Image (cartoon, rainbow, N blue to C red):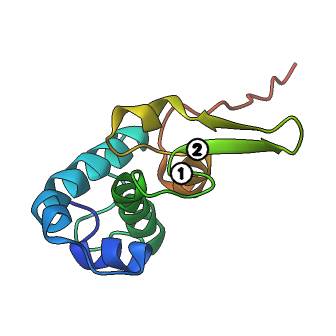
Amino acid sequence: MALATEDDVEDRLRRPLTSDESNYVDAVLDEASLIVTEWCDDDAWSTDAVPDMVILVVSRMVANVFSAGAEQLSPAGGDSVQLQAGPYGVTRHYSGDAATGGPWLTRDMKRKLRPWRTGGMAFVVDMVP
């Protein structure tokens, strides 16, 4: 079940979906929702009360998939861009997950989801002598 809607994706894109995107959006929303649920290690929310930040992250993941083909200075999935004036040059670095063509979690998205992550976190145990 998707944690965001087609309308949420359109809000992130700031435009209506094309007919091709509309045909594909439900599958990408499901995939992005699964990735978020797996990263959080648990279904930390009920389907009735999905937090706004989770909706934002899932819809941004889907918007990034649809934006990946658009020409821009730093294409979707790009971590960094290095420009040089002479003797010319551009260097782009992409996150490994962005190269698959499917939805991916960026470092910033993971940070936003941290309150709902139930495992995989380091912790300190105080030792009392």
Which residue in the protein does label 2 denote?
78
| Badge 1 density bin: few <14, some 14–19, many ≥20, Cα 10 Å | some
Image point (42%, 43%), residue name? 104
Residue 14 in the image, given as x and y percentages of width and height: 42, 80
Image point (33%, 71%), residue name? 9
Question: Residue 46: which quarter of the image?
Answer: bottom left
Residue 124 in the image, given as x and y percentages of width and height: 74, 30
Amino acid bearing label 2: Gly
Question: Residue 84: which quarter of the image?
Answer: top right
Image point (27%, 63%), residue name? 3
Badge count: 2
Q: Nearer the viewer, residue 7 or 47?
A: 7
Q: Is residue 32 left or right of residue 1?
A: right
User: Which quadrant, please, contains the N terminus?
Assistant: bottom left
Residue 86 in the image, given as x and y percentages of width and height: 89, 39
Residue 33's place in the image compared with 126, above or below, is: below
Helix, strand or loop at label 2? It is strand
| Badge 2 density bin: few <14, some 14–19, many ≥20, Cα 10 Å | some
Which residue in the protein does label 1 denote?
75
Amino acid bearing label 1: Pro
Q: Residue furthest top?
A: 129
Q: Residue furthest front?
A: 87
Q: Quick check: can you spot residue 64?
A: yes
Image point (40%, 59%), residue name? 67
Question: Residue 90: which quarter of the image?
Answer: top right
Q: Quick check: can you spot residue 1?
A: no
